[in-house]
């Protein structure tokens, strides 16, 4: 394949593979915890980190990582402190992140708002060999952490109060989840971009759960979907010369639409097998043992 | 081992600046089944939440299994069944997956669950009559069945003390009977039980002692009061007051068809 003869495409595809694994893995736990939009919040804050990198002449990936982790921890602490005013505080953080990013990039000599655009929606040519190393290390760390603490994460994200009553270190685990989400945002930044990274965390999970009944299958299926749309999206972006973030997310949403249709069909067939009639939910419930 | 499983002296809890518990004494001995009764807002739920470590005491002292609560680490000894109308979360999970999370406090970190855990899991599912539905998504279950999932989750850790907050809420009368049988078997096996109830119904014969709270204080201690007035009438249709509480979204309430088959 001629596409693979370009070094930058090889790097973009490897990055897409890693992003396709890490984002839905974290996303499954975030969705389970009903914090689907957390990735968005972190992405906004990370933009200030990117701009800070340009201003200070440091690799933007590194400054973005620190900003993302700081933002994620702040979001988690604000959320844990109480419901009242929590969402407003989060909103302030989001706007501050975007405004700070645009402000700082304007002050720096190296970057323009055009530069920011490649961070907002991803860019194929932007994954440098050094970036790829950082992406691989961070994605590896995310996957190892989630695999190692998967059981505890499941319990905390399923029922936080019960987890606390079981004596689990809930605060430490939620902060760890926030940190892995932040690392994932950093990992995904070059490929899908900061504004669309959350879509890759959420949409494959939402797609998978149209057809699944267990957490485990949902998680594994969303990983498969994440890899498929990321790699395919990068290829489409190359062919059509568009931002990869856009093509990846559009593909993911297309997959979601197909899964919704399949899910509806599957449920109708299941209930049709049982009764041969149009299903009334009351009848379905009465058949339960 | 201390025979006192729960030993609370002059317990006080303040939530959002309001004193909810105003000096509650509660002792539960090993093997006892104790019911916490009282009207809504009397502090029953706050009391059990303080006991399982979800609220900090602002006054008084609490010992769990003879250990000051602040230094208590053996949380696997306590099985907690929260007051919930759903066992589902944002991602599908099977009955088995949810129940298995109750075994977690017993497991060593990074170690696989062994045969003892699998056996406990199977017993917990059997005890609540959900073994057949272990592979189903909890979201597909009726309200009463989801309540039983939460009980099985607490049983999976094989606790010495079972703390249940309104286990009969939203459970119809037939199911209440079978639920009373489950609890009776556990009590007979030596499990200490503390349960919050709006009214005891079929659980009454199991209860050794009833503690009635009123406005954050213990109003009465003694044998459970017999059902009286219109509650005692066999046709009494109990509409649970929690079902229409504002913070419970209607979509989470048990569906109207959650009744007996």
Image: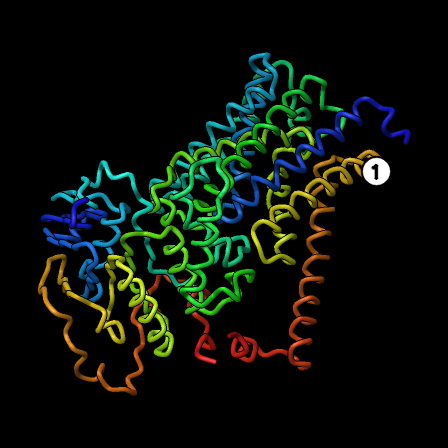
User: Which color scheme is applied?
Assistant: rainbow
Point out the image quarter for the N terminus of chain A: top right
Please provide percent x and percent y for residue B182. 34, 67
Quarter location, residue A59: top right
Residue B150 in the figure: left or right of residue B61? right
> Is A216 drawn above or below residue A238 in the view shown?
below
Q: Relative to the observer, which residue lies in front, A177 or A88?
A: A177
Q: Residue at x 35, y 52 (%)?
A: B158
* Residue hosting label 1: A240
Please provide percent x and percent y for residue B140. 53, 66
Q: Relative to the observer, which residue lies in front, A176 or A239?
A: A176
- Residue at the extreme right: A2
Q: Does any portion of residue A158 appear in the rendered image?
A: yes
Please provide percent x and percent y for residue B155. 37, 56
Residue B140 in the figure: left or right of residue B146? right
Q: Residue at x 21, y 84 (%)?
A: B230
Residue A50 in the figure: left or right of residue A118? left
> Is A63 drawn above or below residue A79 in the view shown?
above
Q: Secondary structure at mark 1?
A: helix
Q: Relative to the observer, which residue lies in front, A92 or B121?
A: B121
Quarter location, residue A55: top right
Q: Does any portion of residue B244 appear in the rendered image?
A: no
Q: Relative to the observer, which residue lies in front, B91 or A35?
A: B91
> Is B51 drawn above or below residue A2 in the view shown?
below
Please provide percent x and percent y for residue A188. 64, 32
- Residue at the extreme top: A57
């Amino acid at each position: 394949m001629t596409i693979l003869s370009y070094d930058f495409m090889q790097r973009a595809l490897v990055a897409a593979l890693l992003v396709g694994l890490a984002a839905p893995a974290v996303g499954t736990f975030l969705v389970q915890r009903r914090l689907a939009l957390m990735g968005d919040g972190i992405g906004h804050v990370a933009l200030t980190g990117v701009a800070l990198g340009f201003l200070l002449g440091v690799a933007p990936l590194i400054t973005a990582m620190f900003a993302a982790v700081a933002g994620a921890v702040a979001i988690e602490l604000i959320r844990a402190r109480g419901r009242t005013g929590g969402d407003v505080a989060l909103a302030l953080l989001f706007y501050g992140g975007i405004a700070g990013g645009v402000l700082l990039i304007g002050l720096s000599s190296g970057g323009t708002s055009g530069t920011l655009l490649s961070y907002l929606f991803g860019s194929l040519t932007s994954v440098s060999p050094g970036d790829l190393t950082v992406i691989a290390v961070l994605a590896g760390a995310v996957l190892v952490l989630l695999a190692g603490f998967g059981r505890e994460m499941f319990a905390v994200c399923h029922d936080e109060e019960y987890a606390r009553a079981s004596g689990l270190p809930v605060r430490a685990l939620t902060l760890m989840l926030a940190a892995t989400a932040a690392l994932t945002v950093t990992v995904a930044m070059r490929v899908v971009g900061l504004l669309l990274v959350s879509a890759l965390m959420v949409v494959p999970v939402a797609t998978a759960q149209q057809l699944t009944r267990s957490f485990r299958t949902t998680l594994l299926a969303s990983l498969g979907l994440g890899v498929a749309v990321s790699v395919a999206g990068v290829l489409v972006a190359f062919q059509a010369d568009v931002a990869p973030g856009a093509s990846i997310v559009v593909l993911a949403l297309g997959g979601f639409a197909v899964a919704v249709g399949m899910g509806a069909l599957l449920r109708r067939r299941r209930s049709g097998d049982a009764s041969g009639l149009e299903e009334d939910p009351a009848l379905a419930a009465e058949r339960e043992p | 081992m201390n025979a006192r499983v729960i030993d609370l002296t002059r317990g006080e809890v303040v939530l959002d600046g309001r004193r909810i518990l105003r000096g509650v004494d509660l002792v539960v001995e090993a093997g006892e089944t104790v019911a916490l009764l009282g009207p809504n807002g009397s502090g029953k739920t706050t009391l059990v939440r303080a006991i399982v470590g979800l609220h900090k005491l602002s006054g008084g002292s609490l010992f769990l299994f003879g250990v000051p609560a602040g230094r208590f680490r053996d949380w696997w000894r306590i099985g907690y069944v929260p007051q919930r109308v759903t066992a589902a979360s944002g991602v599908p999970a099977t009955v088995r997956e949810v129940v298995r999370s109750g075994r977690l406090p017993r497991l060593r970190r990074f170690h696989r669950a062994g045969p003892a855990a699998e056996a406990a899991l199977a017993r917990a599912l059997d005890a609540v009559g959900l073994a057949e539905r272990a592979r189903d998504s909890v979201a597909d279950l009726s309200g009463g069945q989801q309540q039983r999932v939460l009980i099985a989750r607490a049983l999976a850790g094989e606790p010495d003390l079972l703390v249940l907050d309104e286990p009969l809420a939203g459970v119809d009368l037939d199911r209440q009977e079978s639920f009373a049988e489950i609890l009776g078997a556990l009590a007979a096996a030596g499990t200490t039980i503390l349960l919050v109830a709006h009214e005891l119904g079929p659980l009454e014969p199991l209860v050794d002692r009833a503690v009635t709270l009123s406005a954050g204080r213990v109003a009465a201690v003694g044998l459970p009061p017999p059902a009286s007035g219109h509650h005692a009438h066999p046709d009494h249709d109990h509409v649970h007051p929690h079902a229409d509480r504002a913070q419970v979204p209607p979509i989470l309430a048990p569906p109207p068809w959650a009744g007996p088959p």
